[in-house]
Amino acid sequence: MPDRAKRMARAMSAPEHFVDPQSRIVIGICAMDKKAHSKPFKEILSRVTSFNEFEVVVFGDHCILEKPVEEWPCCDCLLSWHSDGFPLHKAQSYVALRKPFCVNDSKQQEVLLDRRAVYRTLQENSIPVPRHIIVSRDYPGQEVPGFEEDHDSVQMNGVRISKPFVEKPVSGEDHNVFIYYPHSMGGGVKRLFRKVDDKSGDYDSSHPGTVRREGSYIYEVFLTTGGTDVKVYTVGPRYAHAEARKSPVVDGKVQRAPDGKEVRFPVLLSPQEKEISRMVTLAFGQKVCGFDLLRSERGKSYVCDVNGWSFVKNSKKYYDDAAGILRSIILNALAPHRLGTMPVLVAPPITPVQEETEEEGMGAMKESHSLQDVKGAEGAVEGEEENEDEELRCVIAIARHGDRTPKQKLKINITQPCLLELFHKYQEKGKQAKLKSPAQLQELLDVVRGLSVRLDQVSQAMEKQAHKKDEEQASHEQQQKRQEQHHKPHHQHQPGGQKQGHKKEAHIQHKRQQQQGKAEQKEQAASAVQHTNAEPAGPAKQRGPDAAGAALPPITTSVAGVQHVGTL
């Protein structure tokens, strides 16, 4: 048997406490206390040191900030990363002095502090980035040659970026990012910033839309991503954990779980995105790294920011994976011959009904090899026969959480063709259409605005029509009142003794207008006067059975203000 195989066999059979403490590898933690004592890092570090192969030395804030690098502790492997207040140049001097193995390259960490250098490194390594321009200023208000700004775009040396676009400060520590919108989308600016309570951005509709000119900025096209951002966490070039969260561009509100943590959910990376993860890790020399990925609705992914040392929060699976990979990275660099010495605690197969032994009380894990053994044991107890041809391949569990925030919904029935057309355009499986992306919401807004304008026009037209109808009805009623007043029936005794009042009233009301009625009245009155003057005075002629020998009373006729009294 080769020597290496013998050593590996002895290592596999030897318990972990037989490892010589003098041969342990010293890991130095050179980071600010807030980061060095964070929960994710402590979880990973406890797993890395669980086999007694490493000795951990934490430098601490006092040592890092106050002492010279010559007095810093010596170590074989250095875990160091930049954060607020961390003296990166001192850490670089320490690496040059002691030459430890660095998991993350300290010189390359300086590149991460300048977004211009980050984008340049990404492009040099053929990693896709959004289309952008860079405007560098040495002092606030400096006029940059080749930079132009107009109504809805910015331009640098002939490269034009149209609104909506993103404006990023070149400093990697400055998170005050602005998004400028064109007037066709309502104009204004959305400001993004580090999370403060439950807010990570706000929208200013009154902003004039002019870009900032007091510093250096990167202007890049705004990519629609469906309202989500993807955070990728790498541990070495062959491992990446990805999580998605609600993008702050949506409404600037942070979606949090009941425990106060931001809601994130794991996502699967495509083969292209896995290759991007590997290339980012190698390009920046950061084995433990985090970066932001934009999944465009057109199907392509882009890297928009690289953050350096980052860990996933609240994921035991990630802690286990990261600890195992970090151990392999460190041993491969400092003691490759010990890669096979990791104790593998494999207990002999036993039945679940066996009583706990003293070794179990000391922490030795004893369990059956698979659920099939448990099933076999239960079958033996119940008298069931085992089928050796059957094998349990997997257990599938479907679970759904019950944590839902009550939503404010308004259900209405719509019949407008434009809304129905929009519904059928985005209808998914079933009877609903989900509109989430900014483009879809903008399309809905345009349709609603058009409907609102048309409804206002119809409402105004109906109001005018109703007002006109009311005026006509009032005028008609007033005209009828005047006709009734001027054409009240007058019973007159004509020479023939016949009453013509009712006949004239009906004739005037139904067939004559007001002016024709007056003219007819004048003509009839004049005719009555002439007939009276021509009749001789004397005994009245009999015209009826009750008119013999009877004299009629005097008749007064009034015509347009002229009064005449006659006796028939």
Image: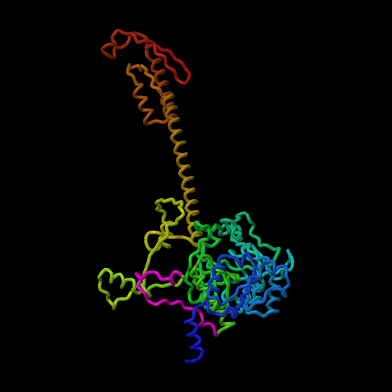
Place of residue 448 in the rendered image (x, y in percent of width and height, measured from the top left): 48, 54
The image shows residue 282 at horizontal and vertical percentages of 58, 79
Question: In this image, 131 relative to 6: left or right?
Answer: right
56 in the magenta segment: no
> Overall secondary structure of the magenta stretch?
loop
Is 190 above or below relative to 133?
above
The answer to whether one can see residue 276 in this image is no
Nearer to me, 406 or 93: 93
- Residue at 62% x, 69% y is 160
Q: Is residue 85 above or below residue 117?
A: above
Q: Quadrant of residue 182?
A: bottom right
Give the camera-side residue of 420 and 503. Answer: 420
Q: Position of residue 36 (x, y in %)?
A: 61, 68
Residue 231 position within the rendered picture, expressed as x and y whole percent measured from the top left:
54, 68
Q: Quadrant of the C terminus?
A: top left
> What segment is highlighted magenta in the picture?
337-361
Q: Outermost residue, front direction?
A: 358
Residue 222: image quadrant is: bottom right
Magenta stretch containing residue 354, yes or no? yes
Q: Nearer the viewer, residue 487 or 265?
A: 265
Inspect this view and state whether residue 106 appears: yes
- Number of numbered discs overlaid on the protein picture: 0
Residue 465 left/right relative to 216:
left
484 left or right of 136 in image: left
